[in-house]
Amino acid sequence: MDPSQFIAPMLAMTAERPFDSPDWWYEVKWDGYRALIHHQDRLKIFSRRGQDLLAQYPELQHLQDVIPHHTILDAELVAWVDGHPSFSALQRRLAVPHLIMAFDCLYSQQRWLLHEPFSQRRLELEALLPVPNEYLVVPSGVQGTGLNLLQAVKQQHLEGVVAKRLDSRYIPGKRVPSWQKFLITQRAWFETVAITRLKSGGWQWWIADTGGRPPIARLPAPAGWDRVPTEGHLLTHPIAVQVEYRSRTEGGMLRHARIRQWRES
């Protein structure tokens, strides 16, 4: 493989339930953009899908003075507001500090580390970047005690926890069970105020706060719902719907939302 070219990142599966294990490493899941950092003859930073993050965030060019040559890091780009990552500030390109949270080393000293266990790649990462600075941080983690970290993450209103088997190899572009994520989610009851048809032929529910407009999410109708309304139908009697979601944007929209249950009057 050419180390100057984009490598699709390895992805974590959503865990059925959080767990502890001495064979696993646990770290904070940061709410930002995935960033694959290649520093060969020049610096390149790719998004999860291979887009050029340097074109969008040219201020990241200063990382070339921090990261050694012949290095590839897997990381997360976050916007930092009031001591917390802010996905909304990142999307809106607000003039706030941006940090790179580096959590894996894929290439170092002109050799690939993909087949090395995560525990060895982590040691390589810490050796490469032993001192945090204002642009790039190697966040700490814990071995064995994922549940305690999850509780701390909840208290800090962060996104979740990523669990990684210490012996896991890095498999580019694959979602694998050797990496799992524990997501902090919320559930609340809202109203479906309108229903429209999708181009695929299915139906979409327009979700709003109870007694409120405009919609805060547009979600596929749940499996098992078979009533066929008039297209574009504004409901006289809204359907009560419980939605699971990760967070709300500054504009009140639901992020990563899905319908859990509903009840019709």
Image (cartoon, rainbow, N blue to C red):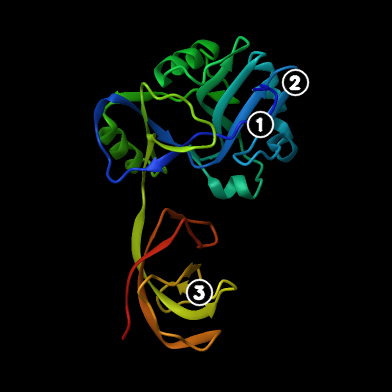
Judged by depth in the image, the label closer to the viewer, 3 or 2, is 3
In which quadrant is the N terminus drawn? top right
Give the side of residue 215 with respect to residue 146, left or right: right
Q: Picture coordinates of residue 136 (x, y %)? A: 57, 24
Q: Amino acid at mark 2?
A: Arg
Give the residue displayed 64% in from the left and 13% down from the top.
Answer: 68
Residue that appears at 42% across and 21% down: 118
Q: Label 3 belongs to which residue?
A: 202
Distance of label 1 from label 2 (alpha carbons): 14 Å
Question: Left or right: 202 with respect to 151?
Answer: right
Is residue 129 depicted above or below 96 in this figure? Answer: above
Q: Which mark is residue 42?
A: 2
Q: Residues within 10 Å of mark 1 (few under 14, many from 20)?
A: many
Under mark 3, the amino acid is Gly
The residue closer to the viewer here, 37 or 184, is 37
Front one among 79 and 3? 3
Where residue 180 appears, x then y in whole percent? 37, 37
**Residue bearing mark 1:** 6
Instruction: Name which of mark 1 and mark 2 comes first in the sequence.
Output: 1
Which one is in front, 205 or 11?
Answer: 11
Q: In the rendered view, would you say 126 is above or below 179?
A: above
Query: Quick one: quadrant of the C terminus?
Result: bottom left
Q: Is residue 40 left or right of residue 199?
A: right
* Identity of the residue drawn at 40% across and 25% down: 168
Specify the amino acid type for callout 1: Phe
Residue 53 falls left or right of residue 183 = right
Q: Residue 15: x and y, percent?
A: 33, 43
